[in-house]
């Protein structure tokens, strides 16, 4: 798989269209997400470690909003429980097509990986099988706020008693000074990764209406409302965090 640099926002656009996971984004996605999300490689790899910790034999593991399947690949590197399978789901046709290619390449390189099915579907309409591990890696923030609780309730109901949800998100902060500091550090991270002021500004305009981050307090409250009994932050870098939620 070739590594295509993200240059989507390098030239001034008369009008910045709302961000979608289309063919152009898919082509540059591995570069874009690594240069945009502080800690992304650590979160992905350790979601595999968490999956191995919580997976139960003969159960399903879900990667919801799988994009190119980075988390699915990490699960397959770390989980070897007998009878487990992965279901990876995304509603972007372009992502799903490329995700299948990436997973076929992983199958060609390694033996005895967990079987995986990639579904092109809206996770809001999906019926979940009983599951030991659900990953929502930077997906919930793209779901309409009024639909987030219902999705988490559905996940909670499908989770086996010893299972877990791994939820990674960009955060906003109720304290204005904390919000500004951590956002400024995120911008510094983007600059350090080679993004120009123009690229940063145009990307912000593209995502501001389609990606609506919550605060940690909102995540905790919503997860408890959905029926989870334990919520633990296991990773945070600047304004990006990952949580474990247990039934
Ligand atoms: C930031 S990306 C996720 C990154 C990915 N999990 C990873 O670790 O590389 C968000 C993904 O969620 C998908 N998505 C957004 N809303 C969705 C929905 N309702 N159903 C299924 N997928 C959705 C998008 O198509 C996109 O691929
Ligand atoms: O907050 C930003 O500036 C981002 O680019 C974040 C983010 C994400 O968190 O998913 C948004 C869209 C892209 O998929 C990659 C990264």
Image: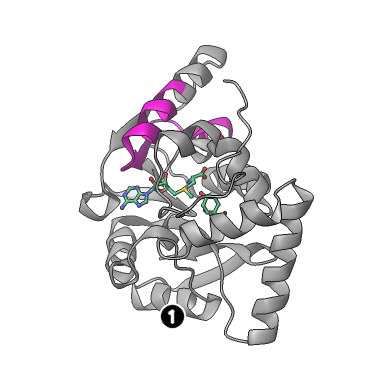
The percent coordinates of residue 245 (x first, y second) are 48, 65
Quarter occupied by the C terminus: bottom left
| Front-most of residues 168 and 74 | 168
Tell whether 199 sits left or right of 19. right
**Residue 165 visible in this rendered orientation of the protein:** yes
Q: Assess mark 1: CB under 8 A from ligand 2?
A: no
The percent coordinates of residue 206 (x first, y second) are 47, 57
Question: Was residue 145 drawn as part of the magenta stretch in this picture?
Answer: no
Magenta segment range?
72-101
Compared to residue 138, the image places residue 62 above or below, namely above
Q: Which quarter of the figure has residue 115?
A: top left
Residue at figure coordinates x 20%, y 52% from the top left:
125
Ligand 2 resides in the quarter of the picture at bottom right
| Front-most of residues 52 and 17 | 17
Q: Secondary structure at mark 1?
A: helix
The residue that disc 1 covers is 221
The percent coordinates of residue 205 (x first, y second) are 50, 61
């Amino acid at each position: 798989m070739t590594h295509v640099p993200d240059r989507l926002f390098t030239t001034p656009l008369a009008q910045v269209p709302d961000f979608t996971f289309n063919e152009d984004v898919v082509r540059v996605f591995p570069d874009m997400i690594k240069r945009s999300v502080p800690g992304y490689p650590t979160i992905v790899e350790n979601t595999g470690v968490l999956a191995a910790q919580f997976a139960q034999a003969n159960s399903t593991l879900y990667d919801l909003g799988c994009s190119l399947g980075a988390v699915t690949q990490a699960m397959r590197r770390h989980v070897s429980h007998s009878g487990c399978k992965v279901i990876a789901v995304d509603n972007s046709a372009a992502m799903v097509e490329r995700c299948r290619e990436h997973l076929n390449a992983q199958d060609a390189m390694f033996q005895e990986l967990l079987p995986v099915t990639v579904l092109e579907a809206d996770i809001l309409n999906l019926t979940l099988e009983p599951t030991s591990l659900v990953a929502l890696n930077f997906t919930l923030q793209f779901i309409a706020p009024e639909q987030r609780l219902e999705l988490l309730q559905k996940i909670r109901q499908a989770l086996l008693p010893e299972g877990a949800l791994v939820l990674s998100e960009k955060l906003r902060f109720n304290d204005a000074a904390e919000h500004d500091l951590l956002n400024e550090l995120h911008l510094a991270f983007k600059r350090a990764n080679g993004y120009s002021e123009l690229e940063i500004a145009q990307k912000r305009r593209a995502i501001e209406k389609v990606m609506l981050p919550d605060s940690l307090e909102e995540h905790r409250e919503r997860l408890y409302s959905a029926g989870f009994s334990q919520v633990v932050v296991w990773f945070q870098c600047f304004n990006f965090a990952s949580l474990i939620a247990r039934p």
